[in-house]
Amino acid sequence: MRYAQIVLGPAGSGKTTYCKVFQDYLFSCKRNSYIINLDPATEESLVFENEKKKGNLSRNNDKASTFDTDIRDFVDIGTVIEAEDLGPNGALVRSAEMLVQNLEWLSEQLESTYADESYLLFDTPGQIELFLHIPYVKSISQLLQRLNINCLAVYLLDVSFMNDPAKLISGSLAGLAAMVNLEMPHINILSKCDLISNKSNKVVRNNFMDVTSSTFGFSPEDLKFQKLHLYNDHSNDDGDDNMIEYEEFYEMVNRSSDDLVSSIDNHLPQMYKKLNFAFASLLEDFDLVSFMPLNINDEECLEQILVATDVALQYGEEAEPSAKFDLSDTI
């Protein structure tokens, strides 16, 4: 049996980083894992070359690319832009359509390259239309099922979205849309938590979660709540005043839908109140969207995500019992 994660999320949510970190963690767990790139517009090759020159690769310095299979070997987005006179997003959609029309290429790559017990990580583009308006991701998930590969959708949302009620609702709605459209096992992950914490798992105040980054700003209640929890001095034994416990941080971000709607209503015209309420009610009625935190520097956090994905993928359930097992040993 082979296993696969289809990694989704908005552009910049850390999908490629997640794939690389999770691949290394799977390798440390003695699992053969591979990254398949489905984004024809990625610039990861430049990042990989820079890291290789600096000697910062965590393992396998002889590897030629971050990706083990790459859609750019099938279609070149620059050629599509020139040939069909399209912009970047239009060319991305057209490239996706070309792969959907030629799925046998991807099927051959998967069947000829990856043996039994392989663990595949599919890195996808961040454009939401690729799993809402065209059957790009869904076609690939259906192909994996036909190839008898257990697959799971992993939706990443940037932790900075938690600092803005409007962004949080929109990101959660996108995650819910992915769950409903793909019709497959699914988990949601809050990425980049490592950017707001230090080695002792304390949340550290920095510009990444600054209130000024909010799209609509905050109501007085929001500002008071955030000042109380994030911007007060919290002294500890080391004398560091800008740290709080994770529990306090999640008390701020895990707020009810009524609180989120109230915050948004303070910044939008009266005519949008019913729409805001409908969005929040939709999330509450489905009651499917919840997030696991991802700190790429915390091995315990990675272990928790691995356990959750293993349960969703039914990892190892079809493995044969050990031939050396002797019932008398347990008596």
Image (cartoon, helix red, strand yellow):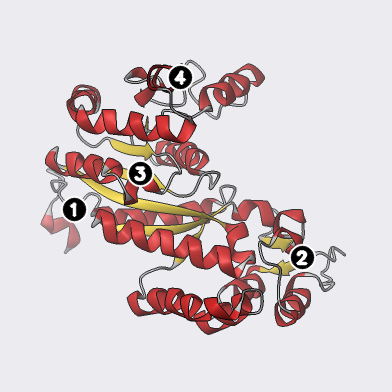
Pick whichever, 146 or 31, lies toward us: 146
| Disc with the residue nearer the chain's start (3 vs 4) | 4
Q: Nearer the viewer, mark 1 or mark 4?
A: 4
Q: Nearer the viewer, mark 2 or mark 4?
A: 4
Q: Are marks 3 and 4 in contact (CB under 8 Å)?
A: no
Q: Position of residue 152 (x, y in %)?
A: 29, 51
Q: Are marks 2 and 3 in contact (CB under 8 Å)?
A: no
For the residue labelled by badge 2, is the local secondary structure a helix, a strand or a loop?
Answer: strand
Q: Amino acid at mark 4?
A: Gly
| Disc with the residue nearer the chain's start (2 vs 1) | 2
Q: Amino acid at mark 3?
A: Leu
Q: Nearer the viewer, mark 3 or mark 1?
A: 3
Q: Amino acid at mark 2?
A: Met
Q: Residue at x 76, y 55 (%)?
A: 207
Residue 294 shows which numbered tag?
A: none
Separation of disc 3 and disc 4 at Cα?
19 Å
- Residue beneath label 2, please? 243
Q: Are marks 2 and 1 in contact (CB under 8 Å)?
A: no
Separation of disc 2 and disc 4 at Cα?
46 Å
Q: Are marks 3 and 1 in contact (CB under 8 Å)?
A: no
